[in-house]
Amino acid sequence: MCDEQQGLPLIGDKAPSFKALTTQGEISFPEDYEGKWVILFSHPADFTPVCTTEFMTFGSMAEQFAERNCQLIGLSIDSNYSHIAWMRTIKERIEWNGIKNLEITFPVIADLKMEVANKFGMVQPNEDDTHAVRAVFIIDPEVKVRAILYYPLSNGRNMNEIFRLLVAMQTTDEHGVATPANWEPGNEVIVPPPGSCGQAKERVEGAGDDYHCLDWFLCLKSLDD
Ligand code: BEZ
């Protein structure tokens, strides 16, 4: 496997490295985030309505992500001064959805030259050639891209879903299981399907207290924690 990817990163690839100016000073990825999950997300522009609601939602959840060992990093093709002014406006003037007086503490990249955006395929010219789309890259502590979401300019993302996915992937890593549709912490998880006829038989015959099977390929269990 290559250390630096050619072309756009896909799930399973090593995430491209970068240095960037942000609202929290210069950052170097991945060096500054060793051992952490990182959610790198882009928004089209500062001082725009959908982006403001997204930022306020992510900002209000930053602690929740930090408790999951995950650092948020925002990005748009705006200057650092614009980012700073927008964040001051959010803190001082905007009250929305029960969120007010919000200090955004995660770094937001000022990517005027589109250097980082282009590495992550965040500018999608048929949608808009001067603004980033709403991209989300979830990157694990091994610097591997684990999930990618792309949304259009017109529709805000669901930050609860992004958090849910992070927790689901961490649960997969910790317990070697998969998670079913609409999984939430505390729900049953999926035992990896058997890889041979013998294992399939064993799996079905072994069902009992630890796990139960709807069929040989779909077995579920509870996690104790
Ligand atoms: C918004 O965040 O509201 C927005 C940004 C760019 C284009 C359209 C909407």
Image: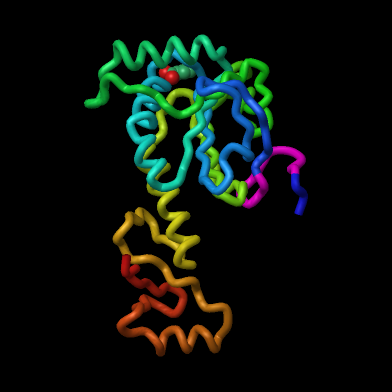
In terms of depth relative to the viewer, which is nearer, 57 or 154?
57
Q: Main secondary structure of the magenta part?
A: loop
Count of numbered tags: 0
Q: Is residue 12 left or right of residue 175?
A: right
In terms of depth relative to the viewer, which is nearer, 125 or 78?
78
Residue at the image point whose x is 41% and y is 68% from the top? 190
Residue at the image point whose x is 60% and y is 21% from the top? 21
In terms of depth relative to the viewer, which is nearer, 65 or 179?
65
Res 223 quadrant in image: bottom left
Measured as percent of width and height from the top left, residue 193 is found at: 50, 74
Instruction: Check the image and name the residue furthest to the left.
Output: 98
Task: Tell me the quarter of the image containing the N terminus.
Answer: bottom right
Residue at the image point whose x is 67% and y is 47% from the top? 14
Q: Is residue 178 magenta?
A: no
Measured as percent of width and height from the top left, residue 119 is found at: 68, 32
Answer with the quadrant where ligand 1 appears in the image. top left
Question: Can you say whether 104 is above or below 173 in the image?
Answer: above
Question: Can you say whether 212 is above or below 183 in the image?
Answer: below
Q: Is residue 175 left or right of residue 19?
A: left
Question: Can you say whether 60 is above or below 209 in the image?
Answer: above
Measured as percent of width and height from the top left, residue 139 is found at: 56, 45
Task: Tell me the quarter of the image containing the C terminus.
Answer: bottom left
Structure colour scheme = rainbow
Measured as percent of width and height from the top left, residue 183 is found at: 35, 56
Question: Can you say whether 54 is above or below 162 in the image?
Answer: above
Q: Which residues are magenta?
A: 4-14
Q: Is residue 6 magenta?
A: yes
